[in-house]
Image (cartoon, rainbow, N blue to C red):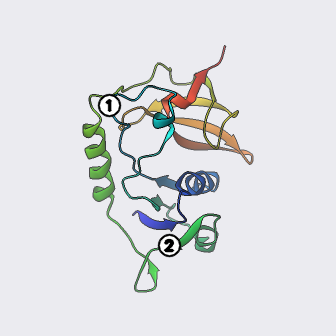
Amino acid sequence: MWHVLHTAPHAESQVSTFLAAHGVESYAPQFPPPPRTRLGSVRAGRHHWVFPSYIFFRTPRDFTQWDRIGWAPGVRQVLQSDGSPAAIDEDVVDRLRRRLAISGMGRRSGSNFRPGQTVVVERGPLRMLDAIFERDLDAPARVQVLIELLGSSVRVALDSADLRATG
C-alpha cells in the first residue's frame, strides 16, 4: 500500500531524499519538461510536479517508525483516514506512472548506462555522490541507481541527465 505526505512548498526533492535514506520508497510524479527544452537549461532543471507539495510513499511491511516520517524535515503531515495513515491502492500509483510514461513518449527515453556501471550524480541534492547504475525506469529519462548512504545501499530514482559515467 502507498500513503501520501503533504510537504512544505518546494520540499518534494528534500523529503524524497530523506525517505530514501531511511529505506522508504517514495514517488513524486512529474510531468516531462516542455518539448523544446534543451538539456542543462534552466527550464530543464525545474520540476513540473503533477501534485505540488504531495509525495506518495510506501513503507516496508514491518515498518513502525511513523513518527520519523511525520517529523521529517519538509513534511507538513501524513494524510490520514480514521486516525491512521490513509492507504492508496498499488494500482492507482502504477496507473499514474504508466500514464506519465505515455505522455512523455516523444521525449528521450532510456539511458546510455549499463547495469552495474559506476556513475556520478552531477546535479540535485545528491550531487557529487558515486552510484551504481541499476536500471531504466518506466518514466521517461528516469533511472534507478544504488547509492551508499549511512552504511547501506539505497535505491534512488533520478533523472538520467543528472548522471555522468565514470572512467
Which residue appears at 60% of the width and 64% of the height? 74
Can residue 148 be seen by looking at this rendering?
Answer: yes
* Disc sitting over residue 27 in the figure: none
N-term mark: 2 or 1: 1
Residue closest to the eye, 143 or 100:
100
* Three-letter amino acid code of the residue under disc 2: Val
Residue closest to the eye, 48 or 59:
48
Callout 2: few (<14), some (14-19), or many (20+) C-alpha neighbours within 10 Å?
many
Say which element carries label 1.
Answer: loop
* Disc sitting over residue 35 in the figure: 1
Q: Quadrant of residue 130?
A: top right
Query: Do the residues bearing badges 2 and 1 touch, measured as CB atoms within 8 Å?
Result: no
Q: How many marks?
A: 2
Which residue appears at 48% of the width and 68% of the height? 6
In x, y percent, where is residue 27?
45, 52
Q: Is residue 50 left or right of residue 102?
A: right
Can residue 143 be seen by looking at this rendering?
Answer: no
Q: Quadrant of the C terminus?
A: top right
Which residue appears at 60% of the width and 51% of the height? 17
- Tell me the residue that label 2 is attached to: 78
Is residue 75 placed above or below 80 in the rendered structure? Answer: above
